[in-house]
Image (spheres, rainbow, N blue to C red):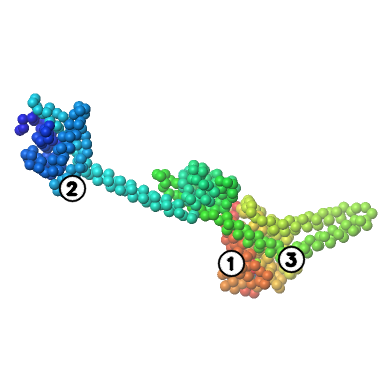
């Protein structure tokens, strides 16, 4: 046993899990425990005998210990702590956290009690963590770069508040800097007319976690209106659930569609003009006659006025229908629509033209009013297009029947004619623009019809037998 020892301290010293040493003031190792001998790669005897002190690694370590301890002596009784990278004889680096304390070794001598803690594993773990973090940051950067470069507009929202927008999204809403838009609710961007849609989607998400594609009318920061189409996904963003909306500007496309629809409507109006002129001429003739009668009559006849009034109403009705057709549809107002009422109005409009071609239009009335959700003028357009086609297919005359069937889920509108019918190939190409078999046809009617039905959440079926007739069935969701 060494002179500067005490049996209790010796035991604690030897058994300590961290490396311990007693070092003299001039830097010779007096005593080490086995944990330190493992750490430094030399036996306890070798270390205390001074032999490995020839080893430059041990020498450098001891110098560092003494230097730090002496510096710390200026501020006793603080222990000196420092980090040190020790070069182990087995050629690896050991990261040490070293703490030195000046101590009385016995009555005569003072020395340093030095603790060596192995931080190598910790260092490695830290290093790995750092690398992982770096990789994550790189991935995130790549992801952000991708988002920024994407031509589609990306919005990330949490509870309807915008947390991220990419460059395309900024352009979409005419913003110059993300700060113009971050923190704003999507309610501000989506036009008031679509707030219902927005709320329904939120409710649907809350109920089923489901969220899909959608079209919105949006209002840009400078007030400009745009139509967008897109879809929403739910992701984890910065540790929370968030919605990523990916949108495309379809304003131009929509305008083009509106233009096509408008020009088709004008064509239809032109083609209907002959029938309408006829329809207006009849009441005008009768009004003319009654006015003449009134002039020659001794006193006015109440009946004449009634007839004149009703004929004027009729003219008004027809002129109104004609105006509906030529009105642009930039405003898409949707509401509950009485299908049968529309059908009646259209029949009024087309009846004369039909009669001229020896065609009878027979509507089958439903028992009670049938409602669908939609836009009146567009649904009128559907009836007009189908009836016009039916009439144009019936050069020999005949009947066109109109039926409205309904149950809780859907409303069916069936237009059946006795015309020339279509071959299977013709049916296949229905609805493709500019495909027509008529000299003055546009081949746009059914495309628009399909489009309108699709926008109303419906579908259309066709059955046809050449030389016998055609049946168009429209399915629309019931209100
Ligand atoms: P258009 O009437 O201008 O030709 P549409 O898109 O309305 O354009 O119709 C496209 C084509 O579909 C018509 O040219 C015709 O060949 C066929 N078609 C449509 N409806 C009928 C029908 N009821 N009976 C027979 N053929 C039809
Ligand atoms: Mg047509």
Q: Which mark is residue 92?
A: 2
Q: Residue at x 65, y 60 (%)?
A: 262
Of circles 2 and 3, which is in front? 2
SS class, disc 1: loop
> Disc 1 designates what residue?
432
How far apart marks 2 and 3 lie (CA) works out to 100 Å
According to the image, label 3 marks what residue?
Answer: 353
In terms of image quadrants, where is residue 431?
A: bottom right
Q: Is the residue 59 above or below the residue 321 in the image?
A: above
**Nearest-to-viewer mark from 3 and 1:** 1
Q: Residues within 10 Å of mark 3 (few under 14, many from 20)?
A: many
**Crowd rating for badge 2 (residues with CA inside 10 Å; few <14, some 14–19, many 20+):** few
Judge left or right: residue 160 versus residue 50. right
Question: In the image, what residue occupies the spot 9% across and 42% down?
Answer: 54
Residue 443 in the image, given as x and y percentages of width and height: 63, 67
Mark 3–mark 1 distance (CA, rounded to whole Å): 27 Å
Q: In the rendered image, is residue 252 in sight?
A: yes
């Amino acid at each position: 046993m060494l002179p500067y020892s005490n049996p209790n301290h010796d035991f604690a010293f030897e058994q300590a899990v961290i490396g311990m040493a007693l070092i003299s003031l001039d830097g010779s190792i007096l005593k080490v425990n086995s944990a330190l001998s493992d750490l430094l790669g030399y036996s306890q005897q070798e270390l205390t005998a001074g032999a490995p002190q020839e080893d430059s690694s041990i020498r450098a370590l001891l110098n560092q210990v003494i230097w730090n301890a002496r510096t710390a002596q200026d501020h006793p009784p603080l222990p000196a702590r420092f980090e040190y990278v020790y070069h182990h004889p087995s050629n690896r680096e050991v990261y040490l956290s070293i703490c030195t304390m000046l101590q009385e070794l016995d009555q005569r001598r003072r020395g340093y009690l030095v603790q060596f803690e192995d931080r190598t594993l910790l260092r490695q773990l830290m290093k790995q963590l750092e690398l992982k973090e770096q990789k994550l940051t790189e991935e995130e950067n790549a992801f952000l770069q991708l988002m920024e470069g994407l031509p589609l507009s990306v919005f990330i929202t949490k509870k309807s508040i915008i947390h991220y927008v990419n460059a395309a999204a900024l352009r979409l809403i005419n913003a110059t800097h993300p700060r113009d838009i971050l923190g704003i609710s999507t309610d501000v961007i989506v036009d008031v007319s679509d707030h219902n849609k927005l709320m329904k989607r939120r409710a649907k998400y809350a109920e089923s976690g489901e969220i899909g594609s959608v079209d919105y009318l949006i209002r840009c920061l400078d007030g400009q209106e745009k139509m967008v189409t897109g879809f929403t996904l739910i992701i984890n963003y910065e540790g929370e659930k968030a919605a990523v909306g990916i949108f495309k500007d379809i304003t131009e496309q929509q305008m083009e569609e509106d233009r096509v629809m408008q020009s088709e409507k004008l064509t239809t109006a032109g083609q209907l003009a002959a029938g309408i002129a006829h329809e207006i001429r009849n009441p005008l003739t009768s009004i003319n006659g009654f006015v003449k009668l009134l002039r020659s009559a001794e006193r006015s006849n109440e009946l004449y006025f009634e007839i004149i009034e009703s004929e004027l109403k009729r003219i008004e009705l027809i002129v109104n229908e004609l105006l509906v057709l030529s009105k642009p549809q930039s405003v898409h107002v949707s509401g509950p629509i009485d299908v049968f009422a529309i059908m009646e109005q259209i029949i009024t409009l087309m009846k004369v033209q039909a009669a001229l071609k020896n065609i009878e239009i027979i509507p089958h009335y439903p028992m009670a009013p049938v409602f669908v959700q939609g836009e009146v003028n567009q649904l009128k357009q559907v009836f007009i297009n189908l009836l016009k086609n039916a009439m144009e297919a019936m050069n020999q005359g005949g009947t066109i029947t109109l039926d409205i069937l309904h149950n809780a889920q859907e409303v069916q509108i069936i237009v059946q004619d006795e015309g020339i019918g279509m071959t299977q190939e013709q049916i296949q190409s229905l609805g493709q623009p500019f495909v027509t078999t008529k000299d003055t046809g546009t081949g746009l009617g059914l495309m628009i019809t399909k489009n309108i039905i699709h926008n109303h959440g419906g579908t259309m079926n066709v059955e046809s037998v050449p030389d016998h007739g055609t049946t168009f069935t429209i399915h629309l969701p019931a209100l």
